[in-house]
Image (cartoon, helix red, strand yellow):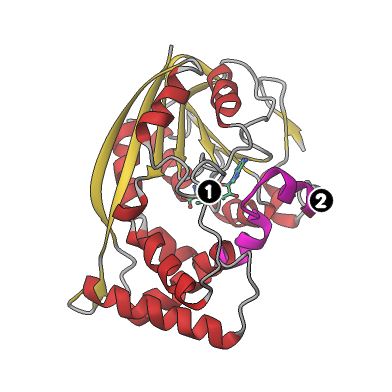
Amino acid sequence: MTRDSLGLVWPLRSDIASGRGIGYRPLKHWIEENWVDWDAMSKPWLEAEGFLNAAHAEVMQGMMARAGLAPGQRILDVGCGTGPSLMLAAEAVGVDGHVTGIDIAPPLLARAAERAPENVTLIEGDAGSYAYPQAAFDAIISHFGTMFFADTAAAFANLRSAAKDGARMTLAVWGRPPKNPWFGIPRKAAVARFPDLPPPDPDAPGPMRFADAEALLAILNGAGWEASAETIDLHLTPGESVEATARMLMTAVSTMLLAPVEPMDDDLAAIEAGIASEFAGFEVDGVVRVPAEIHYLTATAS
Ligand SMILES: C[S@@+](CC[C@H](N)C(=O)[O-])C[C@H]1O[C@@H](n2cnc3c(N)ncnc32)[C@H](O)[C@@H]1O
């Protein structure tokens, strides 16, 4: 463990890589706080890491372009996971800057720690309620990492207090479900096999929670931010065939999607086949390109 110039105690990268300083949070505690069980999700996410990073490349590029990070800045990356945006931010701020990544899932942080450069610090914790130092960050970024807070309004107010006045926060979140077959098709294939699968609660923590950008804007503007939203149509580019995409999507989303049921191997095979058949229309020259809708939120700490 170490203490930074702001007096905050952080686990060292070596603590995380070696497993010290992580894993003390009991699993049950995570599950109660998080409707999405990120402990269970970590294994499939790590297996699909390269696939997911490739799929999200256009989204990430759009977020980093809007964030406009500059050398020397101190950045907070919320829900940093295995660290794709951490690495880009660390490069953008350079050796005179610093990037802090926070995530609730130790296995994902451990992966980030393996490749984090010297100007990166990692924290295991709930980014919504963590006791950050006040006015510490020049900018906050989050690539799909803010949809899972227990109390969204309180979380964005907490992040506001961690930001310097005038700091910019840039978020990438999923848009409306009908425009995001990446989630809609696996759900359709799962419901074909499990007709009683409960529909997702749009207000509960989950990937589509901020599909209504206006609702998110109202929350941000009520939490000390001056926010605007851009809704962009783009493509997810996993760089794989239909079959490989269906297989990886099963890995990546099935834990979350199928959490309420107990699928057998033949159920999983049927769902994978259902995904593959629906995704066939997205294949061009042997590679899948899936249309998606993303909201980019840009907010200034007012
Ligand atoms: C969809 S993943 C995105 C990860 C990463 N930003 C990326 O783009 O690869 C969501 C991440 O948010 C993290 N997360 C969920 N709830 C959180 C919370 N309350 N505080 C911090 N991180 C959280 C998860 O552990 C996971 O790493």
Q: Which mark is residue 26?
A: 2
Instruction: For mark 2, give the secondary structure.
Output: loop
Q: Is residue 177 above or below residue 253?
A: above
Amino acid found under the numbered disc labelled 2 = Pro
Assess whether residue 38 is covered by the magenta stretch. yes
Q: Position of residue 203 (x, y in %)?
A: 52, 41
- Is 186 or 108 nearer to us in this picture? 186
* Residue located farthest toward the bottom when viewing the structure as drawn: 266
Assess whether residue 254 is covered by the magenta stretch. no
Q: Residue at x 41, y 30 (%)?
A: 215
Q: Residue at x 49, y 15 (%)?
A: 224
Instruction: Please provide the residue range marked out in magenta.
Output: 28-46
Q: Is residue 225 above or below residue 149?
A: above
**Residue 282 vs residue 135: left or right?**
left
Q: CA distance from mark 1 to mark 2?
A: 26 Å
- Is 211 or 225 nearer to us in this picture? 211
Q: Residue at x 56, y 15 (%)?
A: 135
The answer to whether mark 1 and mark 2 are in CB contact below 8 A is no
* Residue located farthest toward the front when viewing the structure as drawn: 196
The residue at which mark 1 appears reads as: 201
Q: Main secondary structure of the magenta part?
A: helix
Amino acid found under the numbered disc labelled 1 = Asp
Q: Position of residue 130 (x, y in %)?
A: 68, 30
